[in-house]
Amino acid sequence: MTHDAADSKDTHSTDTASIYSPEEATRYVTSRMDDVRSWLTELVGCASVHDFAGLEEETTRAANWVVDAFTAAGIPVEKHQTADGSTAVIGLRQPSDGMPTVMLYSHYDVQPATDTDAWDSDPWTLTERNGRWYGRGTADCKGNVVMHLTALHGLKEWEELHPEAPKLGIRVVVEGSEERGGAGLDALLEERPELFSADDILIADSGSDRVGEPAQCTSLRGSAGVKVTLQTLEGPVHSGQFGGAAPDALLAMIHLLGTLHDENGLLTVDGLDTSGHWDGNQADPENFRKDASVLDGVELYGAAGTTHGDGPSVTDLTVAQPAIT
């Protein structure tokens, strides 16, 4: 967008010379890959496990890193303490008049890295193997934090070359306790909804089916937890004297769980619609097996697990239909 001599001050005319093209974005990201690796190395190096004894300073260090990084990328962010003790990093770059605001969501906290002796490399050190980067949080979700930073630096550079172009509003929300359920952010959203105001939301907490092939996820299934309690006896009894005739609650639970699926692993619960079909791109079953770490000799559910190919596809089961696990 640009102004010409006939334009008024509050109108914009299209100028193809000042459109941020995919080619420019690709060139920029490629030129900054050394920085991308450096940023990710620094962030992965923070053992930012929320509410984990002994790692409080590491979590604080990660939050401070996120603040400094997004500030350097042109987004004025601040730390917000939340009800569960975590720190959320939130900020807004104001849009030009008439321009929308896009929220970029991610999180900097990670799962604990227990039994580190079983790891192929130190979980807190970014390590390259076979062309891929490994480390706790590299994919979920520190790599996505760095992805946002890289894009924002590219946008900042482009806008410096085109100061006349109208600016998109950028809302940044980087959570600090997503892996513990995100209760702190939920409470902050209820208390301070203005901190989350945006026209669109881009959540960087997903992945691609194929390495090197970009993907955009447009919907996810929701989740619900169900607690089932079975009581068959007033108290424990001796198995040698009563076993075989006295009803066992654990065995009853196993039988109950066994009624949720048929012999092919497909749902059999009345009221759950299992007719959903995904009309878009289909996941490759072999790639899915690898990504899901399915052991050799273990069949997938649905069409991918049968020699005659009957039943729903992998993508039907993971995207378009309900699941019970």
Image (cartoon, grey):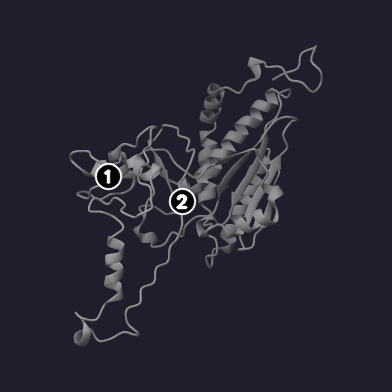
Q: Position of residue 304 (x, y in %)?
A: 25, 41
Relative to 185, 130 lies left or right: left
Quadrant in the picture for the N terminus: top right
Residue sitting nearer the eye, 206 or 57: 206
**Mark drawn on residue 302:** 1
Residue name at image x 34 percent, y 55 percent: 269
Q: Is residue 177 left or right of residue 311?
A: right
Q: Nearer the viewer, mark 2 or mark 1?
A: 1
Residue 173 in view here: yes
Element under disc 2: loop
Q: Secondary structure at mark 1?
A: helix
- Inspect the image, locate mark 2, and give the three-letter code of the amino acid beneath it: Thr
Q: Residue 209 falls in which quadrant of the image?
A: top left
Q: How many marks?
A: 2
Mark number displayed over residue 125: 2
Amino acid at dot 1: Gly
Q: Residues within 10 Å of mark 1 (few under 14, many from 20)?
A: some
Residue 145 percent across, percent down from the top left: 55, 44
Spot the residue most to the front.
271
User: Residue lying farthest top?
Assistant: 6
Q: Is disc 2 surrounded by few (<14), some (14 to 19) or many (20+) residues within 10 Å?
A: many
Tell me: 160 left or right of 109.
right
**Do residues under tags 2 and 1 come within 8 Å of each other at their CB atoms?**
no
Task: Return the x and y of residue 83 as percentages of the image width and height.
Answer: 64, 63
Q: Real-space Cα distance between discs 2 and 1?
A: 39 Å
Tell me what residue is drawn at x 31 percent, y 84 percent: 236
